[in-house]
Image (cartoon, helix red, strand yellow):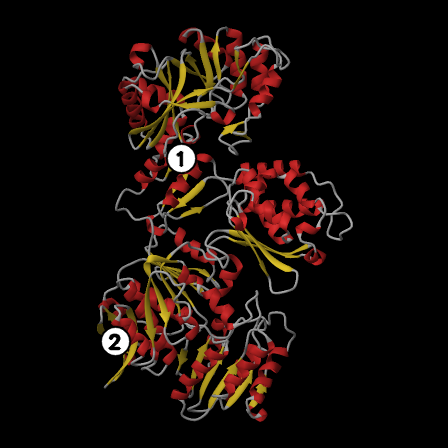
Amino acid sequence: MKILETQVYRGPNLYGYRPVIRLTIDLEELEEYPSDKLEGFVDRLVAAIPTLDDHTCSYGVKGGFVRRLREGTWFGHILEHVALELQCLAGTPVTYGKCRGAGQPGVYHVIYSYEEERAGLEAGRIAYDFLRGLLPPHLPSASGENYDLEAAKNRLARIVDEVALGPSTRSLVEEARRRGIPAIRLNDRSLVQLGYGVHQKRIQATVTSETRHIAVEIAQDKELTLKLLRDTGIPVPRSVLVSSEEDAARAAEEVGYPCVVKPYNLSHGRAVSLNLTTEAQVREAWKRVYELADHALVEQFLAGKDYRVLVIGGEIVAVSERTPGHVIGDGQRTIRQLLDAVNADPRRGVGHEKVLTRIELDEQAMRLLQQAGLTPDSVLPAGKTFFLRSTANLSTGGTAADCTAQIHPDNAEIARRAARIIGLDVAGIDMILEDIGRPARESGGAIVEVNAAPGFRMHTSPTRGKTRDVAAPVIDMLFPPGVRSRIPIVSITGTNGKTTTSRMVAHILKMTGKRVGLTTTDGIYIDGERIMKGDMTGPWSARVVLRDPTVEIAVLETARGGILREGLGFDLCDVGCVLNVTADHLGQRGVNTMEDLAYVKRLVLEVTRDDGVSVINADDPLVMGMRGEAAGKHLLFSMQPGNPVIRDHVANGGLAASLEEGLNGHMITLHRNEQSIPLLWTHLIPATMEGQAMFNVANALAAAAMAFALGVSLENIRQGLRTFDTTFFQAPGRCNVYDQLPFKVVVDYGHNPAAIRAMGQFAQNLRRTRLMGVIGAPGDRRDEDIRAVGAAAAEFFDRIIFKEDVDRRGRPVGETAKLLQEGALAAGFMKSSITIIEDERDAVNASLAMAQREDVLVIFADDIPGVWKQVIYFGKPSA
């Protein structure tokens, strides 16, 4: 058994609408060994990972997967389940997976979901190595090693702790997604974007994009925080800011013993020393602070319980009583043994892996033991509690009990006022009180800290008491009722016409005054300005647009390659469109037939919102075949006047766009509520070259349909189409016509048979004498597809120069041009009318020199800007 390929899908993909990893594996000899034929294998596997018994598998009940193991199942299926379970055990619960044949004997695609990419990949590697270690040694796939699964699980848990969202951020992301608000992780820590484009908000842990920077700065300065609270009548302990050991000793005398020494600007209880009763203890505490900070706060020690009051948007949403990490003696076991028992609690893990954190015998614990005259091997009396932490932070092993219902109204008002005084939208107010149910002013309690970015774990997963939904109020605050989180997204795919149609749609939307983000094969555009150059039709480019805080609407050209490589860069679109499906890219990435290609492109329609619109080409049988899976309303468009499919669809109340015949030519017509709305004569659209470029008529029809689906006014659609042209500067490589020479030159990026034929038909309409073509094809296409390009060219051109692309994509020089010629000759084209010039620049220069007055020269270019310069500077003296 071996892994042939690992593929990570980060958005909706061919295997599901969630992120998945696909391992392509060759079972080799294991194809003949299902699990029931491997003696002892199943028992060893279940003994090593007993929680596999929780997997229901196809039986839908607990134990279903283990039953499949004993009945006999193949290794791809087993690898899938083990990779999933390892992630669950590491603290990232995932359940979705499948195993499918990859089209070759013994080769399978193993698909499993993940929450964190790095952890998901590592889980797959561990599962693969672990399973090989379980195989009988006589099999070639057996590793022959005694695999240390526990060490691997610990390694995976550490990775999860490093890369997974913390419990606070995760709760906010999960709540947002429950409401349909998209979330994009912006770094490998806790910075997350909620929403798209201009409607986006950001969170980092529990700091939001609405949190005031000055409020965070104040909260981080503990001395300033206490001063502001004290000056506004909030009960706080006496405190003095110090910057030296001597200052600390004097300050302790001033505030009185017992006292507290802590850094003035650190969090998570670091270097905090409580209940200090002597000058020596104060001096030692200062030294610990000075290792981390240059100033400390010497503060009056308040006896009582440690409470955290969570204030969100000025309201109390949760209260928790916190207890430092501790052990309770039983008169028999040592402190070390008691601690091992505490850490054996399945709720405790490393970092934020579980709802509670393991308590370590670290420097702080040893110092507290030493101060008490104890060691880890001391035995505590029965019932005696010993605290191994100075502070009650959950991140260091503390516990929490919910007491939201018990807070006294006076204490609640004090907490609300404190949050307002500091200026925090989300604040954790730390109070020391004898009882949260008694007023602080009567019991001598006080606020000791105000925290920006307070942790939510104590409220979402309390050790005792009621779970509180503290994420919902934050999302309510960021996205109140009626406030949008999404921008409209238009996703356009198909074999031909994607770029021009995407540009048309973006241009129409610009007419409405919207700031449009556009991705195309030649770059990313924000409000018409290109911000990145190159083929930008994949998921990464889509995310660039959706992350831009100025974009009001996104138009995303969505290519086959990006879907196959990584999935989509968005979760849902408002309008999804498949323009057409014709032969191209076959034989690549498992796409071998037109039906395969249609299946890939259909994904755009599948992820259309339920209240969105799928725009479908009614003239293309493969596209019409997608209707069963297309989401939202269906808007059909057709270039065939009087198409009965359109007529029936409209009669049933459907949306449509069609090309209809009239006295002055062809009219783009929109249909809604059984009404037909004439929009625009095609000859009035500059991109159609007075109606002669039928491929751009089709593109304009589709663009009008999508704008119509978005609710754009008829006049804005008309104005957008009337002002869109295909000059080089507006649509480079898309039917760019240059007529400043004695002959006419057309530069286009067409590179498949359908595109060659469409351009050939247009060029025939321009013909006066000869029709010449400079033809190439991408080298990564199948031989038969390259020959088909040559055959298509033979149908229209009188004279052909076959050339090769700048990037030959793995083929030797001359091979692509030879295949093109073979295709033309097989179609009956005369060899004497063919010239082969491999280099594109030389081929273009030769064609320009050969062209005569009234000829039409069509150049299918790879280097669009370079070829256009050759054309416009032809015959002019060089600088």
* Local secondary structure at mark 1: loop
Give the total of numbered labels: 2
Which residue position is annotated with label 2? Answer: 680
Front residue of 560/671: it is: 671
Question: Can the viewer see residue 730 in this picture?
Answer: no
Tag shown at residue 399: none
Front residue of 500/109: it is: 109
Q: Which residue corresponds to the image point at 53% horizontal and 31% vertical from the top-left?
A: 351
Report the residue that reaches farthest toward the right.
138
From the viewer's perspective, is residue 533 above or below residue 69? below
Kindly report the distance in space between the C-alpha atoms of the residues bearing marks 2 and 1: 52 Å
Q: Which residue corresponds to the image point at 44% horizontal and 84% vertical from the top-left?
A: 760
The amino acid at mark 2 is Leu
Q: Residue 138: give x, y in percent of width and height.
A: 78, 50
Quadrant in which the N terminus is drawn: bottom right
Front residue of 499/335: it is: 335
Question: Can the viewer see residue 480 in this picture?
Answer: yes
The amino acid at mark 1 is Thr
Residue 473 picture quarter: top left
Residue 610 picture quarter: bottom left
Crowding around mark 1 (Cα neighbors within 10 Å: few <14, some 14 to 19, many 20+) is many
Which residue position is annotated with label 1? Answer: 206
Q: Are marks 2 and 1 in contact (CB under 8 Å)?
A: no
